[in-house]
Amino acid sequence: MTLPFSRPKPESWRSRLWRWGFNLFPAYRGTGGRVIYIAPDWREVHVALSLNWRTRNYVGTLFGGSMYGAIDPIYMLMLIKNLGQDYVVWDKAASIRFRKPGRTTLFARFVLTDEELGVIRQKLDENPSIDRVYPVELVDAWGVVHASFEKTLYIKKADKEL
């Protein structure tokens, strides 16, 4: 399998266990997607989606539902892991633009930067909740975009009970 991007850091044992668990979780496994890399700090995640009998649609290309299902929970989990228990993160909306039929394995790369996490914390000091939009692309091994997504996530500080 040729990847269109490189892994910046080796996985830790903990992130590798998370990856294995994620790929065994029935709801995610059913999408046909596979998490192939989780950075030790959860700032970068890579996903692959292969064309096979479970992900193929009537016309022989990748099923759009599999495409979306493979990328759906990733940014939410990355934000939960990086922001911690003091914050609530929920998927709010998504949009999909199919650009080319998927006839080979497709890949997605998810990245959270220090700047993005800082902006979230700063905005939540000024507002009770915010929405953040994250673009995601499914690309083939040559970097050709087959589907573009925009994920909107709702974020707020968790209510603290005494």
Image (cartoon, helix red, strand yellow):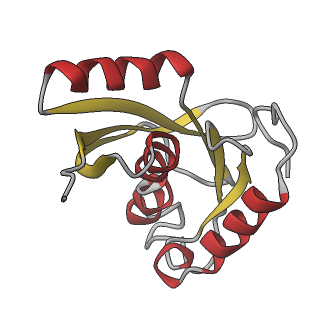
Q: Determine which quarter of the picture holds residue 134.
A: top left
Task: State whether residue 52 is above or below residue 106.
Answer: below
Q: From this viewpoint, which residue is outermost toward the bottom?
A: 26
Q: Is residue 97 left or right of residue 75?
A: left
Task: State whether residue 50 is above or below residue 115.
Answer: below
How many marks are shown on the rendered structure? 0
Q: Determine which quarter of the picture holds residue 128.
A: top left
Query: Residue 29 location in percent, x, y?
Result: 56, 77
**Which image quadrant: the C terminus?**
bottom left
Q: Is 155 or 38 nearer to us in this picture?
A: 155
Identify the residue at image location x=73%, y=57%. Answer: 15
Q: Is residue 103 left or right of residue 158?
A: right
Q: Is residue 148 left or right of residue 21?
A: left
Identify the residue at image location x=26%, y=45%. Answer: 94
Query: Residue 11 location in percent, x, y?
Result: 83, 49
Q: Is 48 or 53 nearer to us in this picture?
A: 48
Identify the residue at image location x=50%, y=71%. Answer: 31
Task: State whether residue 78 is above or below residue 63.
Answer: above
Query: Residue 115 location in percent, x, y?
Result: 49, 15
Task: State whether residue 120 is above or below residue 20.
Answer: above
Identify the residue at image location x=76%, y=32%. Answer: 5
Query: Residue 38 location in percent, x, y?
Result: 70, 50
Q: Is 126 or 35 nearer to us in this picture?
A: 126
Q: Is 127 or 92 nearer to us in this picture?
A: 127
Q: From this viewpoint, which residue is outermost toward the front?
A: 162
Q: From this viewpoint, which residue is outermost toward the left?
A: 128
